[in-house]
Structures are given as C-alpha cells and as structure tokens.
C-alpha cells in the first residue's frame, strides 16, 4: 500500500508531474524562438540586394553609398554583436532576444519608408543590430538549454538561417510584384516576420530558467589561443562567403555567361547552404575532433576557386556546387563555438568574441577583391588571394578543430 500511495502521490496531481508539461512547453517555446530568430538573421541583408537597383534610383544613391549598403552587414555584425553576451548577462537572453527582434522589425519597417539614402542606411543599421545580437546569442542558448543536442539544434537553426537567407533573396521581388510593384512593399514585408519572432520571447522572458544562467558575468577569452584560432577560422570563412555572394555572378558574366545564368549559379551556391547546414553540425557533434570537416570544407572552396581560374565556363555548375559545399565552414564554425566550451557563460563570451573579431576580419574581403580586380583587369589575382586566405583558414581550423575547450585556457575563477 505504501508503494501505491507513493506512486499515486507522484501522479497527475503532483508538483513533479504538473511541472513536466511546463518544462515541455518552455522547451517548445525555446525551439520556436531560436528557429524564428535564425530565420531573421539575414533577411535584412539579402532582401535589399534583390531590389538595390530600384532603391538606388528612388533615393538617388551614389555608388559610394550603394557600396556602403553592401558592406554594412559585416561591419554591423562585427561591432554591434560584441555587447550581446554582456547584455544577456544582465537582462537574460530571452529578454535581449525579444528586444533584438523588435529592433530588427522597427529597422526593417523604417527602411521601407525611408525618404533619403541617409535614413535608409541608419534604418538598415538598426535592423542589422538586432541580427548581430541574435548571431551571438543563439550558440549560447543552444549550449545552455540543449547541451546534449548541440549538433542537432545547431543543424536546425543554421538551416533556418539558410532558409531565411534564400527566401529573402528569392521572394522579395515576386512579393513586390504581386503587391503592386513597389520596392518598399517588398522590403517592408520582412518586418512582419521579425515581429513574429518576438512572440516566443515574450512568453519566455518571465519564466524561471529561461536564460537565467546567462546572467553570470561573461569571462574574457582574449588570452585563449583556441578562441583566437576560432575567430580567425570564422573570419576567413566569412570573408570567402561574402566575396562569393558579392562577386561570383560578375566573375561568371565576365567569363561569357549570360547574366541570368550567372545569377542562377549564384543561387545554386546559396541553396547549397540548406542541405549543408542540415548535415554538417550533427557530423561535427558526433566526434570530439572536427579537423576532417575543416579539411573537406576548405578543400571544396579551393577546388571551386581553381576551377574558376582555369575553366570558369566549362565547369560552371561544378564550381558553384563546390563553393556551396565549402560554405559548410559556416555552420561548422558556429557548431564548434558550442563544442569548444563547457560553461554557458564561456559560450557567450566566446561567441561574441569569435563573431565580432571574425566579421571584422571579413569586412575587408569584398572591397579588397574588387580593388584587385580593378587594378589587374581580371579575376586570376583576386581569386588567387582567396586561395591564400584558405591557407590561413585551414591552419586556424586545424588548430581549433582539436578536442579541447576554451574553459581550460581561462583562469579557474573565470571559467567556473
């Protein structure tokens, strides 16, 4: 009888049983919130690229200002993501992400009604600031709330990021045409998606345990060699990615391919991010050492670049696919941020440092690539520069891919 009473006491009416649905509900909200944030991390970037010509004409943008629009994302991600871990330590990650998505929505809406190039740039920076915060905090939330499923959750959110990136690039113009043909409508629609992303965090912000552990002071990782290696690896892969996104279509056009075909090949590279994001993080988390994946992704980039130099037209599709596979270095880098740490506070510090430093390194890539093209009149020298960057990426990736954690390189008082 005693056993039955105890069993009954742990039944449907017990605190333990009633708490289980609450925990499940919180986890469901967390997953929804993480995925919705990820969907919004690049919409401010790729949506404007689809209608940049119309925006330039409507706002009388100079070539310099248009160039600023295209380089602004990397700069904002580098500068505005840096305080994200600090904010989460004081306010809680749930509150910070809810505010970040609201800021993104406000920036996207303001950009859609901007009457001048200056206002358009400021509104874009506002939208990108929310995305910069999301960049940093998602690895932290995955590590803190799903420590045994870092690979699976990283796959989910990096795939959502890839879907959002591709959707904003591919749907902005069709949506614009379907709703009257105004570029302002095409850009403004994405503010609605950002507002939807606020909702889960409203439910999580007041719940016990929804980011409470992130309120510990984030330690400094500046003295960690592993942190620096990760930052260099992240920066090199970001530099390659932004150069490819910004210049690949032009490389193909100059090789003799029609503009529509060149844009389609760039779309192949972008679309490859979806299956790659599904596959790479679980593979990375399955093994303690990720150096094989570092070698594979770097080699794919290198083969694609060599192909562009030697036979850009004959193997155009193959090079696009290889460059898309090389882009697997991005979800790999994000997953390694979680795998190279133990404590959530260290994850936040590492994520902020790696992404801010990495994007700062990447910011010079597209500009330098364009300058070298203008100086040489061709693409061999600029693409060869990217092959040099890949050497640095490989060395940094091999160092950071080994089974170690940043926590062990920090003073005990900071890491614990």
Image: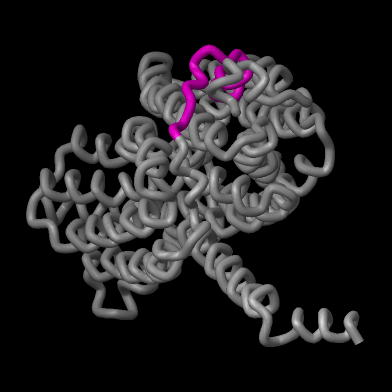
| Residue 28 on image: x %, y % | 59, 70
The answer to if 228 sits in the magenta stretch is yes
Q: Which residues are magenta?
A: 217-232
**In the image, what residue occupies the spot 38% across and 40% down?**
84
Asked if residue 26 lies left or right of residue 87, the reply is right
Quadrant of the image occupied by residue 94: bottom left
The reply to whether residue 233 is visible in this rendering is: yes
Quick check: 3 above or below 397? Answer: below
- Image position of 299 with respect to 143: above or below: above
Q: What residue occupies the far left of the structure in this picture?
A: 115
Q: Where, by quadrant of the figure, is residue 112 drawn?
A: bottom left
Judged left or right of residue 349, residue 288 is right
Quadrant in the picture for the C terminus: top right
Instruction: Identify the residue at the far front of this view.
Output: 2
Q: Front-most of 302 and 316?
A: 302
Which residue is at the front of the view, 29 or 272? Answer: 29
* Residue 179 at x, y percent in the picture: 29, 80
Q: Nearer the viewer, residue 414 or 62?
A: 414
Q: Tell me if I can see residue 319 in this picture.
A: no
87 within the magenta span: no
In x, y percent, where is residue 265? 57, 49
């Amino acid at each position: 009888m005693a056993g039955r009473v105890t069993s009954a006491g742990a039944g449907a009416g017990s605190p333990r049983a009633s708490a289980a649905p609450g925990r499940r509900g919180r986890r469901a909200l967390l997953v929804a919130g993480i995925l919705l944030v990820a969907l919004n991390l690049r919409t401010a970037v790729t949506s404007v690229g689809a209608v940049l010509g119309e925006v330039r004409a409507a706002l009388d943008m100079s070539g310099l200002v248009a160039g600023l629009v295209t380089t602004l994302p990397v700069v904002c991600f580098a500068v505005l993501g840096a305080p994200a871990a600090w904010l989460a330590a004081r306010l809680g990650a749930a509150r910070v992400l809810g505010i970040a998505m609201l800021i993104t929505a406000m920036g996207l809406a303001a950009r859609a009604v901007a009457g001048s190039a200056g206002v358009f740039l400021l509104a874009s920076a506002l939208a990108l600031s929310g995305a910069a915060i999301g960049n940093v905090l998602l690895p932290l939330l995955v590590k803190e709330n799903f420590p045994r499923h870092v690979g699976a959750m990283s796959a989910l959110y990096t795939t959502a990021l890839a879907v959002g990136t591709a959707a904003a690039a591919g749907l902005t113009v069709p949506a614009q045409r379907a709703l009257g043909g105004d570029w302002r409508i095409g850009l403004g629609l994405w503010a609605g998606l950002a507002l939807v992303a606020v909702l889960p965090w409203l439910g999580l912000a007041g719940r016990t345990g929804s980011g409470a552990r992130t309120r510990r002071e984030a330690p400094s990782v500046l003295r960690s060699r592993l942190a620096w290696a990760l930052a260099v690896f992240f920066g090199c892969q970001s530099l390659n990615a932004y150069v490819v996104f910004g210049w690949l279509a032009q490389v193909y056009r100059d090789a003799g391919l029609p503009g529509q075909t060149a844009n389609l090949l760039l779309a192949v590279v972008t679309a490859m991010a979806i299956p790659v994001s599904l596959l790479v993080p679980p593979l990375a988390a399955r093994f303690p050492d990720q150096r094989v994946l570092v070698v594979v992704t770097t080699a794919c980039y290198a083969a694609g670049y060599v192909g562009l130099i030697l036979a850009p037209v004959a193997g155009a599709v193959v090079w696009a696919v290889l460059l898309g596979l090389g882009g697997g270095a991005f979800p790999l880098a994000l997953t390694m941020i979680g795998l190279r740490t133990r404590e959530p506070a260290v994850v936040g510090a590492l994520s902020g440092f790696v992404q801010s430093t990495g994007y700062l390194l990447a910011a010079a890539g597209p500009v330098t690539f364009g300058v070298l093209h203008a100086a040489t009149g061709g693409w061999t020298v600029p693409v060869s520069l990217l092959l040099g960057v890949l050497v640095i990426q490989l060395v940094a990736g091999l160092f950071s891919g080994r089974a170690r954690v940043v926590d062990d390189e920090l003073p005990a008082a900071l890491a614990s």
